[in-house]
Image (cartoon, rainbow, N blue to C red):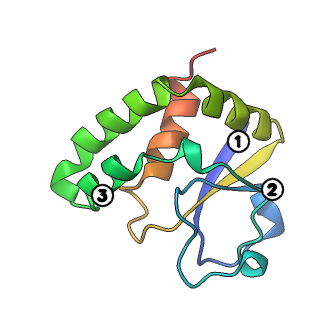
Amino acid sequence: MAIKLKRAYEPPESSDGRRILVERLWPRGLSKAEAHVDYWNKNIAPSTELRKWYGHQIERWSAFRTKYIKELQNNPEALSELRAQCQDNTVTFVYAARDEYHNSAVVLKDFLENRAIN
């Protein structure tokens, strides 16, 4: 499984493969037709409480990663559904955050590639 990351506001490309929205909320100002999302399970995203607490404050990044990973570990059903969607050769996790290095899609990709529970 090859996982790519892309902002929801970037145009889709055929090289994206299966496009999976990994946000709890639909990206603002983006229609479903523009997004070209193949799968969306908002339960894989950080909880509303965690998302609001983080608020994209870089100084909270390390703690956010730890807390989100704990949420993922406690959510085997959503992880199993996501893994099933990732069976294609290439998938692209679509996210809305402006910061391409400090967002939940980065954590989720790392978790699935390096710490996945079988």
Q: Residues within 10 Å of mark 1 (few under 14, many from 20)?
A: few
**Earlier-in-chain disc, 2 versus 3:** 2
Q: Earlier along the polypeptide chain: callout 1 or callout 2?
A: 1
Q: Residue at x 39, y 57 (%)?
A: 101
What residue is at 56 percent from the left and 42 percent from the top? 44
Q: How many C-alpha atoms fall within 10 Å of the one at disc 3: few (<14), some, or many (≥20)? A: few
Based on the displayed image, in which of its 4 quarters is residue 78 positioned? Answer: top right
Instruction: Tell me where residue 93 appears, x and y as whole percent.
Output: 63, 54
At 35% from the left edge and 54% from the top edge, which residue is drawn? 51
Residue 17, numbered label? 2
Residue type at tag 1: Ala
The numbered disc on residue 52 is 3
Q: Position of residue 31 (x, y in %)?
A: 69, 81
Q: Quadrant of the C terminus?
A: top right
**Label 2: which secondary element:** loop
Mark 1 sits on what residue? 2
Q: Count residues near mark 2 (Cα–Cα under 10 Å), then give few for <14, some for 14-19, many for 20+.
A: some
Residue type at tag 2: Gly
Q: Is residue 1 above or below residue 45?
A: above
Measured from the top left, where is residue 88 in percent x and y? 84, 41
Which quarter of the figure is the N terminus placed in? top right
Q: Of the residues tagged 1 and 3, which is closer to the observer?
A: 3
**In this picture, is 2 found above or below 52?**
above
Tell me the residue at 44%/50% (across/down): 104
Q: CA distance from mark 1 to mark 3?
A: 30 Å
Kindly give the residue lying farthest to the bottom in the view shown. Answer: 29
Question: CA–CA distance between discs 2 and 3?
Answer: 30 Å
N-term mark: 1 or 3: 1
Left/right of residue 41 with respect to residue 71 in the rendered view? right
Q: Amino acid at mark 3?
A: Lys
Name the foreground residue: 63 vs 51: 51
Q: Dot 1: what SS?
A: strand
